[in-house]
Amino acid sequence: MIDKMGLLFASLHQETSGGAPEWIVAGLGNPGAQYEGTRHNAGFAALNMLSAKIGVRIERAKFKSMCGTGRIAGKQVLLLKPQTFMNLSGEAVAAAAHFYKLPMSHVLVLFDDISLPVGKLRVRRKGSAGGHNGIKSIIEESGTSDFPRIKLGVGDKPRPDYDLANWVLGRFSQDDRPLFAQSLERAADAVEELLKNGVGSAMNLYNA
């Protein structure tokens, strides 16, 4: 006897997923309400902006992450928010890339950067961790640093002796919030440009 529920589930899954992802877009951050709105959760915030723009809910638990699938620039994309906490982000990102047999050149990572002023973006084709533990974890777990990324500026700590952990786990000032909000919109646009026309085009448009 045919399993009608199984066929229905398969049909619904096919309709909503649109096939296997061609790209992974991962936003880095820490899970939990206490971390919402912090500088270190800029990647989560950017992914939320992107998901809202394309009408995708990030609500499926898989790969130690919350996930959602949708289409960007005609490509099937997995949106990924690791729930491992920042320092173990690579466990989630590498697992998803391995499962879908995607090269890391098709894994785009969004994350915070204290070396950039609030509101600034930097699109990069590849690079070192630059002291960012989330990127360090991805490099260690995937075995390569050759993956594109979009850095969102969160500003440097106010003085050299200021504790870095306290700074990145702190929230934006009232003056900085509008600038950061604008950068989230630009980051979502940069993702679309990168997937549509390549890293070089996104760098030319968004690294000003």
Image (tube, rainbow, N blue to C red):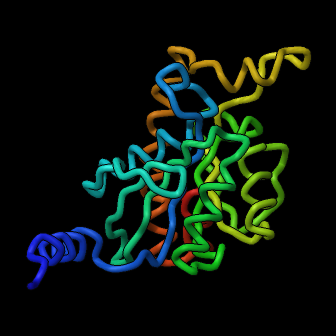
From what the image shows, is residue 167 above or below residue 88?
A: above
Q: Is residue 135 left or right of residue 192?
A: right
Q: Residue at x 59, y 39 (%)?
A: 29
Task: Kindly tell me whether residue 24 is visible in this rendering.
Answer: yes
Q: Residue at x 55, y 77 (%)?
A: 198
Task: Kindly tell me whether residue 207 is visible in this rendering.
Answer: no
Question: Residue 184 location in percent, x, y?
Answer: 47, 43
Q: Residue at x 73, y 18 (%)?
A: 166
Q: Is residue 118 left or right of residue 66?
A: right
Question: Residue 91 location in percent, x, y?
Answer: 67, 55
Residue that sits furthest to the right in the current view: 161
- Quadrant into which the N terminus falls: bottom left
Question: Residue 72 location in percent, x, y?
Answer: 36, 69
Q: Exactly how many numbered labels are in the figure?
A: 0
* Nearer the observer, 170 or 63: 63
Residue that sits furthest to the front in the current view: 1
- Quadrant into which the C terminus falls: bottom right
* Nearer the observer, 74 or 208: 74
From what the image shows, is residue 98 above or below residue 86?
A: below
Q: Residue at x 66, y 23 (%)?
A: 169
Dividing the picture into quadrants, the one containing residue 28 is: top right
Residue that sits furthest to the bottom in the current view: 1
From what the image shows, is residue 9 above or below residue 187?
A: below
Dividing the picture into quadrants, the one containing residue 38 is: top right
